[in-house]
Image (cartoon, helix red, strand yellow):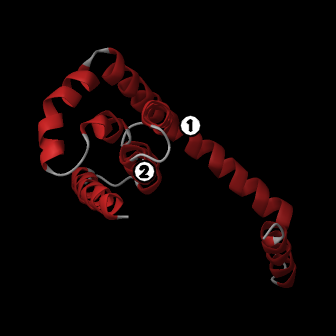
Amino acid sequence: MKYVIPVIFIAVLVYALIKRVNIFSAYSRGAGEAIKFTFTLLPTLICIFIMCQLFERSGLASALTDALSPAMSALGIPKELTKLILIKPFSGSGSLAYLTEILESHGADSYISRCACVLYGSSETVFYISAVYFAACRQKKRLLPIIIILISTAISTIFACLLCRFL
């Protein structure tokens, strides 16, 4: 397993030599494009990071957690996971902090901790990934893909907790 990346690297180099590609020129061109892409992505990422901090520090995360807890409980999702579910689409590091808090307070083998681990591992930072994707493709219709992702995340959250209950 530790040889996978070196083998891929060597295979790409051999393929480039066979196709007579100027490897250094292609690499330089790609690195230049990556730098340009980074600068187009940077304002969006800064905005997302600021929004995550505002979401948490303004108290909106706690207010939404309290408001959504009854609905989450009705769907079979423990109320302790509400904050994790709310922050995960925005911030991977923020959700990792909540996961750690859940594991410390409920123990690693509890139902809530198992659900939290499955939710953390099976969901994605939707808005971060969307920012990267939309910055790269310049697509104008951004709302529909985000809605679809959030709905699928909600459905997978419900099923994850259901599976953890029985396993």
Q: Residue furthest bottom?
A: 18
Kindly identify which numbered label has been placed on residue 114: 2
SS at mark 1 in the image: helix
Q: What quarter of the picture does the N terminus occupy? A: bottom right
Label located before the other in sequence (2 or 1): 1
Identity of the residue drawn at 43% across and 57% down: 122
Disc 1: which residue: 39
The x and y percentages for residue 83 are 31, 33
Q: Nearer the viewer, residue 124 or 8?
A: 124
The x and y percentages for residue 8 are 78, 73
Identity of the residue drawn at 34% across and 55% down: 139
In this view, the mark in front (2 or 1): 2
The x and y percentages for residue 135 are 44, 47
Q: Residue furthest top?
A: 58
Q: Nearer the viewer, residue 64 or 20?
A: 64
User: What's the amino acid at mark 2?
Assistant: Arg
Relative to 8, residue 38 above or below: above
Kindly identify which numbered label has been placed on residue 144: none
